[in-house]
Amino acid sequence: MNFPFYRPRRLRKTETIRNMVRETNLTPNDLILPLFVTFGKNVRKPISSMPGQFQLSVDNIVKEAKEVKALGIPAIILFGIPEHKDAEGSSAFDPKGPVQEAIKAIKNKVPSLAVITDVCMCEYTSHGHCGIIKGKDVDNDATLELLSNEALSHAEAGADIVAPSDMMDGRVAAIRDMLDENNFSHIPVMSYAAKYASAFYGPFREAAESTPQFGDRRSYQMDPGNTDEAMREVALDIEEGADIVMVKPALPYLDVIRRIKEEFGYPTAAYNVSGEYSMIKAAAEKGWLDGERAMMESLTSIKRAGADMILTYFAKEAAKVLQK
Ligand code: PBG
């Protein structure tokens, strides 16, 4: 198979042939759109660090859900911005909270759109950490009860999948137990299993108003240098009952996605996070690169690495490109 007999360029000559031999094909069905739901009515507040993304009130999120569904995207993941925050994040399981109300409204109007909920305390705590603070750190075991209550309240409102993102030890088992005890044994857990302490979450924290008021998240999120540890995290979460495992962020961790997919063969999700989105948006705004092509190349690379699902702020834009 040597030159001049074999010439790889033969199969790159036309768009049609390139399409025929492409190994990785992105479809709208691969995508999940994250949405930020806030209190109030008729709110559509732009998020300045994430051009094209908004905080939406429940009425507007229903409109958004209809559009998402029409584009062939199967699911959204909801993040809440509550009216009140306190040290225990008690509004996380308020049955009338923005996320709970949004779930009910969406399941009522667009029932076939899968509604995933992010289960974490950081949007609800006054200090912005992902659990209860004891001393200077998050108290793991005390936080499990809050997370379980939050997951249950999402299931009661009608969520299709719950997705814990806090990185407390034992939270998948705690949530699984709580759901099972309350007749929600059919609700899957999508675990943010390998979630790294990343600078790429910066824009999200403006969007969700969840910046830690002191310290950082390195005592619970993973160190960027580690992959063996990611395998242990995934193994634990699967043992505890996770149905889908997630890697986050996506682009700086493609090797981790690949290794998890190969070792576990589980449904694997990857989160193309806010910083990955905003970098491309900012460079495109400046005319430094072609935003649409950079978006499609990024998403294709995440799928090529082994992700079965991609959580991405680009979901609608990418689905529109794929429809052309
Ligand atoms: C909550 C949570 C975060 C993200 C998803 N869930 C932020 C964080 O851990 O600080 C980040 C998503 C993104 O950057 O797009 N814990």
Image (tube, rainbow, N blue to C red):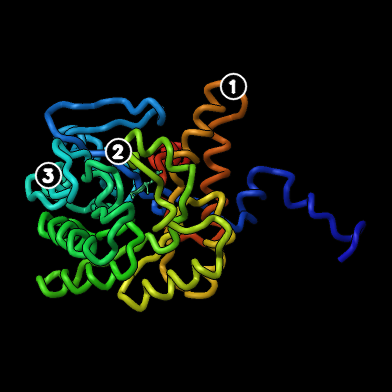
- Left or right: 149 in relation to 50: left
Comparing 131 with 227, the one in front is 131
Q: Are marks 1 and 2 in contact (CB under 8 Å)?
A: no
SS at badge 3: loop
Q: Quadrant of residue 57?
A: top left
Outermost residue, front side: 135
Residue 29: percent from the left, percent from the top?
A: 39, 53
- Which residue in the protein does label 3 denote? 97
Residue depicted at 43% across the width and 42% down the height: 201
Q: Is mark 3 within 8 Å of ligand 1?
A: no
The answer to whether mark 2 is within 8 Å of ligand 1 is yes
Q: Which of pointers 1 and 2 lies earlier in the amino acid sequence?
A: 2
As measured in the structure, the alpha-carbon distance from the residue carrying label 2 to the one carrying label 3 is 15 Å
- The amino acid at mark 3 is Gly
Reading the image, the residue beneath label 1 is 287
Residue type at mark 1: give it. Gly
